[in-house]
Every structure is written in C-alpha cells, then in structure tokens.
Image (spheres, helix red, strand yellow):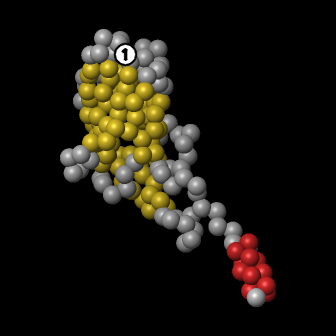
Amino acid sequence: MSVLVFMALLTAGCSSIDCPLNSIISAKYMVHSDTDTLHDTLSVVALRLDGTATLLNKDVNITNFSIPVSYGNAFDRMQLMLTDKNHVTLTDTVTLYKTDTPHFESVDCSPAFFHTITNVEWTRNAIDTIIISKPSVTYDTRDENIHIHFKSGH
C-alpha cells in the first residue's frame, strides 16, 4: 500500500504543468483628459447581446481601467457614463470590434482566447477620440490597448 502511495506522489510531483493562474483576458484602457486623470466618476457597463447590462467598473480619479474581452462575439459593446460633481451624466457607447484566436499553453491547461482589436466606434457626448494603441490583447496586463481622450472639462 505504501508503495502505491509513494508512486502516486512521485507521479504527481513530476508533473510540470505551468498553466496561467488568470485566464481572463482583459483590454487595458488609458484615460486622457485635460489633466490625464479623469476627475469625474466613470461607470463602465457591458451591454450584452441578449439585452442585459452589467456594471463592470465605477471609479473616480482614474488614469486607466481594464475590461474583460468576450471570446464568442465579433464585437463587445459598453456604455461609459461620465458623471461630474454637479451630478450631470454624459453617456457614450463604445463598440470594440475584434477577432479571437485560441491560445493553448498545454493540453492540460484550459484554452484561452487572445484577441486582435480591428476597429472601435463610439458616440461623442463626452469622448473626443479613441485610439487603438496596441491591437493585440493577451495575458500581458502591462499593455495599453486603447486610449480614450475625453473632451475638455472632464
């Protein structure tokens, strides 16, 4: 019996599976305003294809935020709601078009999907411009994928 336990431990100890701990792939959005820190409250809401919405992020005094990228749709759509100190809210809709590529670390690891951002469309209530700075979305959380430039005064 102890030989079987020893063999099981030896076999388990020799496994060199190096799966990523975090398999969620997120795009990093950099915020640019007059001071490069957005002092208004920014709420980010995911708009799903089935008509539901989910609050993903809400913060004030931010310079960046990260949003998970879907792996089953040709695009992701979200609303960015900017609320100033007078409780006036401006809402913009952002649509991120992308392609998905399966990524395999090992047959023992769950597959992940990397993405290539192909285009971005947005309304222009509070947002001035959006620039794709790095279209490749991978595990690397240091990459700045999207730069959002807000209109003056935000």
Label 1: element kind: loop
Instruction: Residue type at mark 1: give it.
Output: His
Determine whether 13 is above or below 84 in the image.
below
Residue 85 visible here: yes
User: For the view shown, which residue lies furthest in the left direction?
Assistant: 51
The C terminus sits in image quarter:
top left
Drawn side of residue 138 relative to residue 153, left or right: right
Work out whether residue 5 or residue 71 is closer to the camera in this orientation and state it. Answer: 5
Instruction: Find disc 1 in the rendering and name its residue.
Output: 154
Q: Residue at x 35, y 46 (%)?
A: 118
Work out whether residue 18 or residue 128 is closer to the camera in this orientation and state it. Answer: 18
Crowding at label 1, few (<14), some or many (≥20) Cα neighbours within 10 Å?
many
Res 85 quadrant in image: top left
Drawn side of residue 134 relative to residue 47, left or right: right
Q: Residue at x 26, y 22 (%)?
A: 90
The N terminus sits in image quarter:
bottom right
Determine whether 25 is above or below 123 in the image.
below
Q: Position of residue 99 (x, y in %)?
A: 36, 54
Q: Position of residue 102 (x, y in %)?
A: 44, 62
Q: Residue at x 64, y 67 (%)?
A: 17
Res 95 quadrant in image: top left
Work out whether residue 5 or residue 151 is closer to the camera in this orientation and state it. Answer: 5
Residue 135 visible here: no
Determine whether 80 is above or below 112 in the image.
above
Q: Position of residue 46 (x, y in %)?
A: 31, 41
**Numbered-mark total:** 1
Drawn side of residue 24 relative to residue 87, left or right: right
Q: Position of residue 10 (x, y in %)?
A: 76, 77
Q: Residue at x 53, y 40 (%)?
A: 143
